[in-house]
Image: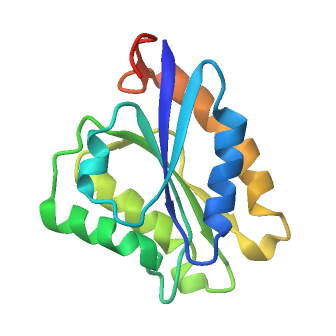
C-alpha cells in the first residue's frame, strides 16, 4: 500500500510554497506519492481526491488566510461539504510577534475542516518566523514525523498500489 498526499498551499510571499516544495521532495518516493497544489482557483471539490491532505499555509493581515486561499476557505464555509472521509494535517506559518493572531491561517483551516467532519492526523504545527529557525528546515523534520503518523493511522490514507 502506498500513501498519496495532496499538499494544499496558502501563501502570500512564497514561504509556504517553499516549505511545501521541500516537503514534497522529502516525502515523494516509491511508497509515497505527493502532489503540491497552490490554493489558487481551488474549491471544496479538491477534497474528493484520494489520499490525505496537508494544508501548508501562512497567516496574513489580522489573522486571515492568505489571499490565494480565500476562495477555497470561503467555498468550504458556504458549501459545508461532508468531509468525514478526509484525513489531514496542518503546517502553519506565522510570527509570534503578532501574538493575538499568531498562526491563525493554519488554525482557521484546522477548525473549519474539523467542523466539516474531517479528522486531523497529528498535531497542528505552528512555525514561528521570529524563532530564527528556517521554516523549510522545520518542515522537513515535521513532515517525516507526520508521515509516520499517517502510516500508523492508515484508514483513508493508504491507497492500493494499482491506483494512481
- Classify residue 44 as left or right of residue 157: left
Q: Visible in this render: residue 151?
A: yes
Q: Visible in this render: residue 65?
A: no
91 relative to 157, above or below: below
Q: What colour scheme does the image use?
A: rainbow
At 56% from the left and 70% from the top, the residue drawn is 58
91 relative to 84, above or below: below
Residue 30: image quadrant is: top right
At 37% from the left and 22% from the top, the residue drawn is 155
At 63% from the left and 77% from the top, the residue drawn is 13
**Number of marks drawn:** 0
Position of residue 131 measured from the top left corner of the image (x, y, whole percent): 80, 71
- Classify residue 88 as left or right of residue 71: right
At 42% from the left and 36% from the top, the residue drawn is 52
Position of residue 112 measured from the top left corner of the image (x, y, whole percent): 30, 61
- In the orientation shown, which residue stands out farthest toward the right? 132
- In the orientation shown, which residue stands out farthest toward the bottom? 62
- Classify residue 84 as left or right of residue 1: left
Position of residue 83 measured from the top left corner of the image (x, y, whole percent): 23, 44
On-image quarter of the C terminus: top left
Position of residue 150 measured from the top left corner of the image (x, y, whole percent): 52, 29
22 relative to 99, above or below: above
Pick the residue in front: 133 or 9.
9
123 relative to 41, above or below: above
Amino acid at each position: 500500500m502506498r500513501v498519496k498526499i495532496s499538499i494544499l498551499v496558502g501563501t502570500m510571499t512564497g514561504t509556504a510554497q517553499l516549505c511545501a516544495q521541500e516537503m514534497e521532495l522529502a516525502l515523494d518516493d516509491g511508497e509515497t506519492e505527493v502532489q503540491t497544489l497552490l490554493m489558487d482557483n481551488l474549491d471544496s471539490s479538491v477534497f474528493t481526491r484520494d489520499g490525505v491532505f496537508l494544508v501548508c499555509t501562512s497567516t496574513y493581515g489580522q489573522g486571515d488566510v492568505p489571499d490565494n486561499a480565500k476562495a477555497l476557505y470561503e467555498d468550504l464555509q458556504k458549501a459545508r461539504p461532508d468531509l468525514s472521509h478526509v484525513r489531514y494535517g496542518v503546517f502553519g506559518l506565522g510570527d509570534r510577534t503578532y501574538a493575538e493572531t499568531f498562526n491563525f491561517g493554519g488554525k482557521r483551516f484546522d477548525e473549519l475542516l474539523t467542523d466539516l467532519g474531517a479528522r486531523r492526523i497529528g498535531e497542528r504545527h505552528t512555525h514561528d518566523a521570529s524563532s530564527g529557525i528556517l521554516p523549510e528546515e522545520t518542515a522537513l523534520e515535521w513532515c517525516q514525523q507526520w508521515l509516520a503518523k499517517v502510516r500508523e493511522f492508515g484508514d483513508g490514507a493508504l491507497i492500493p498500489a494499482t491506483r494512481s
